[in-house]
Amino acid sequence: MKNDQGSVQSHAQSAYSYDEQAREYGWYGPEILFGMCFEYISPDSKLLDIGIGTGLSSALFAKAGLEIYGIDGSVEMLHICKTKNIAKELKQYNLNDLPLPYSNSLFQHIISCGVFHFIGDLQPIFRDVSRIIKPGGLFSFTVKAEHYDRKTDYSKTNDMYYSERSPEGVEIFTHRKQYLKYLLQLLHFEELKEQLFLVQNGQENNYSTFFAHVVKYKK
């Protein structure tokens, strides 16, 4: 798994203004994921938020009565999250250091919002998600992805994603849609919902394409 440490440093520097900046950029990934998951959730279920940050996504699930566990690489982000009193447990952890520090089949729900476009090869972390999620559990996440189909055998190619540098120098990954489909099938996830949404790039009329996914672990 490739995870640009610049993304952690960038978020650490902006931790105290992150929530405000997210709204200025029209980042509604948290609300989109929650809306897509709402029909499947139930109070007291355990939810892990991978890259919980300041808790924008988890706050919505906490209000719905879920038991929140969060993990993030930024101490500063976790400090902001802790002040919101939404999580039962928060851990500072480098997502490069797999396996994640949780036991097998622990969570009914796992979410990751606004994280995976900082990671190139998603297979290692998706595989570990399949380890710590319960059978029948939901995995919900966002990616920066192409919105057209492309027929490629991803078992025989490295054509999984491409990347570019943000103005801040952080490497941003766009994942091929067919690669994601291949990966989900490989790891026994069934796609339930998919939603395209746009995020402003800091300039008027300049947007990036993102997808929100809700998938169920079938094994």
Image (cartoon, rainbow, N blue to C red):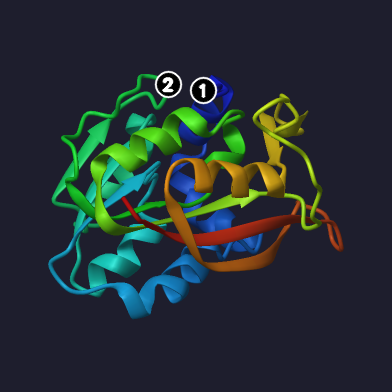
Q: Secondary structure at mark 2?
A: loop
Q: Which residue is mark 1?
A: 1
Q: Residue at x 25, y 41 (%)?
A: 132
User: Which callout, 1 or 2, points to the residue nearer the camera?
Assistant: 1
Does the rendering let one see residue 39?
yes
Does the rendering let one see residue 165?
no
Q: Residue 94, located in which quarter of the rendered image?
A: top left
Percent from the top left, x then y, of residue 82?
A: 23, 47
Cβ atoms at labels 1 and 2 below 8 Å apart: yes
The residue lying toward the viewer, choosing from 50 and 193, is 193
Side of 195 relative to 114 (left or right): right
Image vertical order of residue 176 relative to residue 6, above or below: below
Tag 1: amino acid: Met
Q: Residues within 10 Å of mark 1 (few under 14, many from 20)?
A: some
Q: Which mark is residue 96?
A: 2
Q: Residue at x 70, y 49 (%)?
A: 177
Tag 2: amino acid: Asn
- Mark earlier in primary sequence (1, 2): 1
